[in-house]
Image: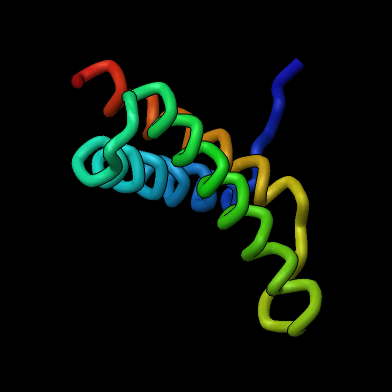
Amino acid sequence: MTIKIAPDKWKHFFAGIVMGAVLQITAITFLPFTVIVATLIVFAIVVSVSYGFELYSKFTGHGHYDFMDAVASVAGGVLGMAIIFLFQ
């Protein structure tokens, strides 16, 4: 059994990687918290931005609302955060 992932989900996933990595670097550099607290803050931002963008699409009609797009973005964001977290 092969699972096919739609091409647009990959775009959200890769955009999430960039978002998570950039936010993680920014939080570690500029927030006066421990790394764990900064990481939790970044996770909350990644989830908020990912789902917020989908809600924006739903309510304004600009774009297409798809909950799985938000899931793909969050998954990528967590991977981006983890990559930066490992290299600290």
Relative to 3, does residue 15 appear above or below in the rendering? Answer: below
Between 28 and 56, which is closer to the camera in this rendering? 28
Residue 24's quadrant in the figure?
top left
Q: Residue at x 23, y 46 (%)?
A: 30
Q: Residue at x 60, y 45 (%)?
A: 47
Relative to 7, does residue 60 appear above or below in the rendering? Answer: below
Q: Is residue 19 left or right of residue 40?
A: left
Residue 33's quadrant in the figure?
top left
Q: Position of residue 50 (x, y in %)?
A: 60, 53
Between 14 and 3, which is closer to the camera in this rendering? 14
Q: How is the image coloured?
A: rainbow
Q: Is residue 83 left or right of residue 19?
A: left
Between 45 and 69, which is closer to the camera in this rendering? 45
Q: Position of residue 18 (x, y in %)?
A: 35, 46
Q: Residue at x 68, y 34 (%)?
A: 4
Quadrant the N terminus occupies: top right
Q: Position of residue 70 (x, y in %)?
A: 66, 49
